[in-house]
Amino acid sequence: MKKSSSPLLTDKTKALLKEKGLSITQPRKTILEFLLENHGPFSIEEIHQRIGESACDLATVYRCMGQFEKEELVEKRFLGDETLRYEFRDESHHHHHIICRNCKNVTPMDYCLISEVEKMIQDKGYTNITHSLEFFGICPECNISD
């Protein structure tokens, strides 16, 4: 990784890996710290590029992200192109995205009305409920330049 992580971040990363029953390896720690420090979503290739080849190889990033997804540490995002992206799953800050059709800029939307529907579904006895919703439009900057 380009910069060293704070001791608090390292402690949080180790605790998350331990909580999920994953051994604490340097690649897992580096990738998870990157996701915690940088608000995604990021493709696997972007993660690999940003943490650097010296941190781990591309195959290791793929493997780690598969493990993180299985353990629900990350969520997949499809943002209207062919690239699968991931971001850290922060249950205290669920959000959606709006993607500009022109410049492909991704903007997080911090409020989720659908979470209220999820609560109603839970009241009916369903568990492990998730949803994904992305919006597409033309951003203000692209509207000005058109």
Image: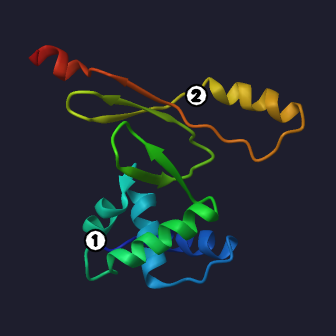
The disc label shown at residue 113, or none: none
The residue furthest left is 145
Q: Identify the residue shown where x is 57% and y is 61%.
A: 69
Q: Which residue is mark 2?
A: 112
Asked whether, in this view, residue 105 is left or right of residue 110, the answer is left
Q: Identify the residue shown where x is 47% and y is 76%.
A: 29
Coordinates of residue 139 in the picture (x, y in percent):
26, 22
The answer to whether one can see residue 3 in this image is: yes
Q: Quadrant of residue 135?
A: top left
Coordinates of residue 56 in the picture (x, y in percent):
34, 81
The disc label shown at residue 3, or none: 1
Three-letter code, disc 2: Cys
Coordinates of residue 54 in the picture (x, y in percent):
26, 83
Asked whether, in this view, residue 103 is left or right of residue 48, the answer is left
Q: Quadrant of residue 62?
A: bottom left
Q: Residues within 10 Å of mark 1 (few under 14, many from 20)?
A: few
In this orientation, which residue lies closer to the viewer: 57 or 111?
A: 57
In this orientation, which residue lies closer to the viewer: 59 or 48?
A: 59
Nearer the camera: disc 1 or disc 2 = 2
Mark found first going from the N terminus, 1 or 2:
1
